[in-house]
Amino acid sequence: MEHVGIVVDDLAAATEFFVELGLVLQGEGTVEGRWVDRVVGLESVRADIAMMQTPDGNGRLELTKFHSPSIQDDTRRGDNRHAPANTRGIRHVAFAVEDIDAVVAGLRARGAELVGELERYEDSYRLCYVRGPEGIIIELAERIG
């Protein structure tokens, strides 16, 4: 996989959230022009992007803030920032972490909140879902045992 893309309204807040999680900002920039219009199937696209990379270099996230055309909520669903984890579509991105308690504390300090509870799965993992900026759900997984 090359990367996972997440569209956000507040690019700075989303970038800070993922930096707190341990991702590294690879680069930022603006994309616009006919080539972008043709790729995404929209007209007059102008967007800022931030490319984030996991510390091990094996995964990347592209955070995108569209300036034009403006983000359109699906009127059938409305704003899904508080949608439950079982809502159709991409609902979460999972990250392996070394110290889940420290990561959760750091994210909470930035306004994130647990979706459910921090739980142990057998003798394999400690797991939780965290809801970050704009309703983005992140699963944290600490391998144990």
Image (cartoon, rainbow, N blue to C red):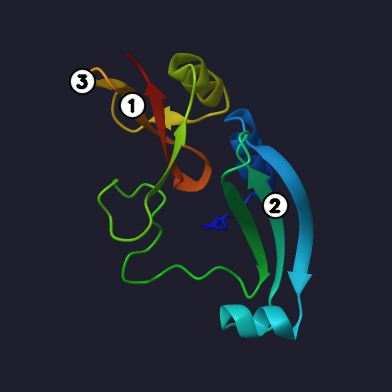
CB of mark 2 within 8 Å of CB of mark 3?
Answer: no
Q: Residues within 10 Å of mark 3 (few under 14, many from 20)?
A: few
Which label number is shown at residue 12? none
Residue highlighted by disc 3 = 122
Give how far apart the Cα atoms at labels 2 and 3 are: 37 Å
**Image coordinates for residue 27, horizontal then vertical, percent:** 77, 50
**Image coordinates for residue 88, horizontal then vertical, percent:** 28, 60
Residue highlighted by disc 2 = 50
Residue highlighted by disc 1 = 127
Give how far apart the Cα atoms at labels 1 and 3 are: 11 Å
Query: Amino acid under label 3?
Result: Glu
CB of mark 1 within 8 Å of CB of mark 3?
Answer: no
Seen in the image, is 3 located left or right of residue 19? Answer: left
Height in image: 4 above or below 121?
below
Height in image: 113 above or below 68?
above
- Asked which quadrant contains residue 122, the reply is top left
**Image coordinates for residue 129, horizontal then vertical, percent:** 36, 33
Residue at image position (28%, 22%) is: 124
Q: Secondary structure at mark 3?
A: loop
